[in-house]
Structures are given as structure tokens and as C-alpha cells.
Amino acid sequence: MEITASHPLALPVGVTLDRYIMHRQTAFPYATGELSQLLRDIALAGKIIHREVNRAGLIDLTGGMGVQNVQGESQQKLDMIANIRFSRALKNGGEACAIISEEDEDIIFTGNNNGKYVVAIDPLDGSSNIDVNVSIGTIFSIYRRVTAIGTEPSLADFLQGGRRQVAAGYILYGSSTIMVYTTGHSANGFTYDASLGEFILSHPDIHSPADGQTYSCNDGNLASYEDGIREYLTSCRQKEYTARYIGSLVADFHRNLLKGGIYLYPPTQKSPTGKLRLLYEAFPLAFLAEKAGCLATSGHQAILDIKPTSLHQRTPLFIGAPVMVENLMGFLR
């Protein structure tokens, strides 16, 4: 059989996540394999959640639990499942000594006190959207612990600040499932091929557009935004920018990362300190965004420069194309 240049067998073999991690391990700050394994553990849990999301409507996994989580938000069935799946994968992997999650009030101790890393995670962001087939996601952040190895980890391991992250990223469960992460050098995306059971490199070395014409925010809160935010949004409309707001942070961020745009979650009268969580939403996305050429600010300082004081601390978030973020800041001064 003659194999032409366009024949599927002539195409290059895709780079799997495992192969990419192995090849890049020497670029990690601590290239001894533990961080590589930790990323694989997160990817494994992501594959399991991909499966659960895709069959949620068939096995009664949609809808609420009838209870609230520690954030005072209605807990969805998939929130609980995702929290269990990721916690179990990280415990069994042995590299994480502790975890914090949106779904748990306190630190989750894994029992692996010899583990060198701690993980902050939002197991399933936007989970209420699963009922209507809208994209949802997982957000994660990894730190090298500051407490002595072999001892019980503490709050200090999680309150190091955003610039001490050694890796961060997200998994988006949508028309396809994609994992995007950085270890501080570049941001890379891997699309899940369910037929192979592998994440395949699909978006190498992501560089987000410096400018854009898309803004993403909840217009329903417009009356509660400060004057500068309302003035900026008015200017966007006058320029005939496109409004796109899904209501899933990962989905909105991912679209703007690839196509150029700005995501806004300002403070409101009801939430004057902001609503998004600093440690496992704002920090990881800001860390990744900066590696892809974007900016992230609270409106007063760079997100990564905020000093964290508590596990579930909240913050306003403005993140995206640098030209758009800088333009917004001009309205806030």
C-alpha cells in the first residue's frame, strides 16, 4: 500500500502528556520526578471526571445535593464526586502531603507527610451548568511545601503567595476535554483523546493575543459595580466589542486566553472584597496567564502580589489581554 503525505499513517505521532512531562522534567525547579507524578495524578482524575461528566445525565449525577458547601453555595452532585476523585487521586499518588479544596473548610491531610508538595484545587468550577450541557472545569495550583518533610503540613504551606507556585493550570470539560498547565516556563494545552485514553499536546507554547474585542462579565450585577467598571463597560459597548459570558470561569478564561479578551469579576455591594477565591481560582489562573502573555489584577495590584491570609480568601479579578487590562486600569485610577 502506498502511503501518501496526506494519509493518516503519514501524520506525526502525537505527543502525549506523559511523554511531554518526561521530556520537560529537566526544566522543573526540582527535577526528581515527584512534580511529574503529581501532574499525572491530576490528569488521571481529570480523565475520570471527563467520564462522569459525559454520562451525568444517564446515571442521575446532575442537580443539587440539597446542601451548601463551606462557601455558602448550593453543592451539586458532581461537586462532591469531583472532590472525592481528585482527593483520592492525590492521596494515592503519594506526592501531595496536603490539599485544600473549595468543597472543604479545612486542610485535607493525605497522610503522606513525606510528600514535598501541597495542592490547592477547585474540583469542579461552574458545576451548576452541567444540567444544561455548558462547559465546566477544574482549577489547580501546586506549591513546594515550606514545612519540614516528614512533619505534618500546616497553613503556612498554602499561604506562600502566588509567585511561589511551581505549577498551575486547569482542565476544561466541554466539546472536548483539555488540560492547560504551566510549570513556570510556558503554557501548554493537551486535548483528551478518549479512544486512546491519553491527553495529546494540541496547544504548544500558548501566546495569548495582546489585545482583543471580547469582554466577559455578569451584566446582571451592573448596578452594583463601581463607577469605573461601569464606565469601562460603556466604552466597550461604544467600541462595539463582543460580550461573551458563560458563567463558568474556566470556560470564559480559556476562550479569552486563546482568542484575546478580558474577564471581569468586580467587587459588588453584596461582595465588596470580591467573590472568586484567591488560592485555588485567581492565583492559578493568574500564574498561567502571565506565562501566556496576559495580565491579572485585583484592580489595585497584580493578583500574584496579593498576600494571602486565609484558605478561602476572596478577591476581585480582572484577567486577560494586557492592552485591555491596562485600559481598564485607566478607568479605575
Image: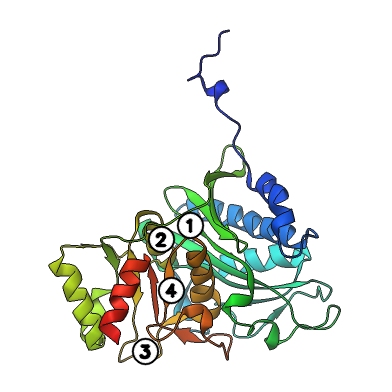
Contact? badges 4 and 1 (CB < 8 Å): no
The 10 Å Cα crowd at callout 4, few under 14, some 14 to 19, many 20 or more, is: many
* Amino acid on which the number 2 mark rests in the picture: Ala
Tell me the CA gap for discs 3 and 1: 27 Å
Residue 205 position within the rendered picture, expressed as x and y whole percent measured from the top left: 52, 51
* Amino acid on which the number 3 mark rests in the picture: Ser
Image-based side of 100 in relation to 36, left or right: left
Tell me the CA gap for discs 4 and 1: 20 Å
Q: Which residue is mark 4?
A: 296
Q: Secondary structure at mark 1?
A: strand
Residue 36 position within the rendered picture, expressed as x and y whole percent measured from the top left: 72, 57
* Amino acid on which the number 1 mark rests in the picture: Leu
Q: Secondary structure at mark 4?
A: strand
Image-based side of 3 in relation to 302, left or right: right
Tell me the CA gap for discs 2 and 3: 22 Å
Q: Secondary structure at mark 3?
A: loop
From the image, which quarter does the N terminus lie in? top right
Q: Does residue 134 appear in this view?
A: no
Please tell me in which quadrant of the rendered image residue 299 appears.
Answer: bottom left
Q: Which residue is mark 2?
A: 251
Q: Which residue is mark 1?
A: 172
